[in-house]
Amino acid sequence: MTLAFELEALRGLADPNAVFNDARQWTEYVGVVSEKPTYVVTNFTRKHRVRQDFFSGPRGVRESLENVKAQFDTDRHVLVGTTDEDADVAEAAGWEYLPLEQAAEAAGWQLAGDADEEEDPFESNGRDDWP
């Protein structure tokens, strides 16, 4: 399987690096596609230590998906996204579409909004003995 994440879907994950590492266990190729400029994708993936097999570069999502499908000959090509537009683009490019929430539930990935936030040790705890 070739698995692509639309950048906004990747941003919706609590730990994108862990998700990519997990996906590598059962996919052949995993990458990121986006309409955003290349540097936006690169900055995000570097910050989160995501090692991708492909990314959209200067092309749009549909063209990128078509090129990836032609380059990576696997039995399935799946796009994980967050919008109806992502689903339409996937269909137009001949890819399967999977909404982020459904993919996360099936794979056991934690969504960013579901992460238990650690307490900030420097956050005020109501002490009033400070000058």
Image (spheres, grey):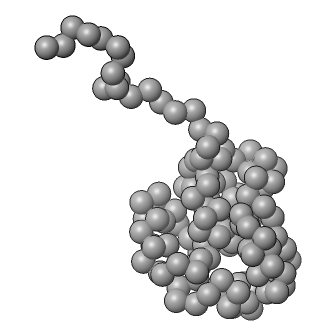
In the picture as drawn, the residue positioned furthest to the left comes out as 131
Q: Is 83 rendered above or below residue 107?
A: below
- Image location of residue 116, percent across then percent down: 57, 32
Q: Is residue 127 above or below residue 54?
A: above
Q: Residue at x 61, y 65 (%)?
A: 8
The number of numbered badges drawn on the structure is 0
Q: Position of residue 66 (x, y in %)?
A: 73, 89
Write the residue at 75% across / 75% down.
85
33 sits left or right of 122 in the view? right
Where residue 95 sits: x, y (%)?
82, 79
The answer to which image quadrant residue 63 occupies is bottom right
Q: Quadrant of the C terminus?
A: top left
- Could you say which quadrant of the image residue 79 lies in? bottom right
Q: Is residue 50 above or below residue 55?
A: above
Is residue 21 visible to us here? Answer: no
Identify the image quadrant of the N terminus: bottom right
Q: Quadrant of residue 43?
A: bottom left
Q: Is residue 126 left or right of residue 113?
A: left
Q: In the depicted view, which residue is nearer to us: 59 or 75?
A: 59
Residue name at image x 60 percent, y 72 percent: 32
Q: Residue at x 66, y 83 (%)?
A: 61
Residue 23 in view of the camera: yes
> In this picture, is 127 found above or below 101?
above
From this viewpoint, which residue is outermost toward the top?
Answer: 129
The percent position of residue 19, horizontal first and vertical second, equals 63, 54
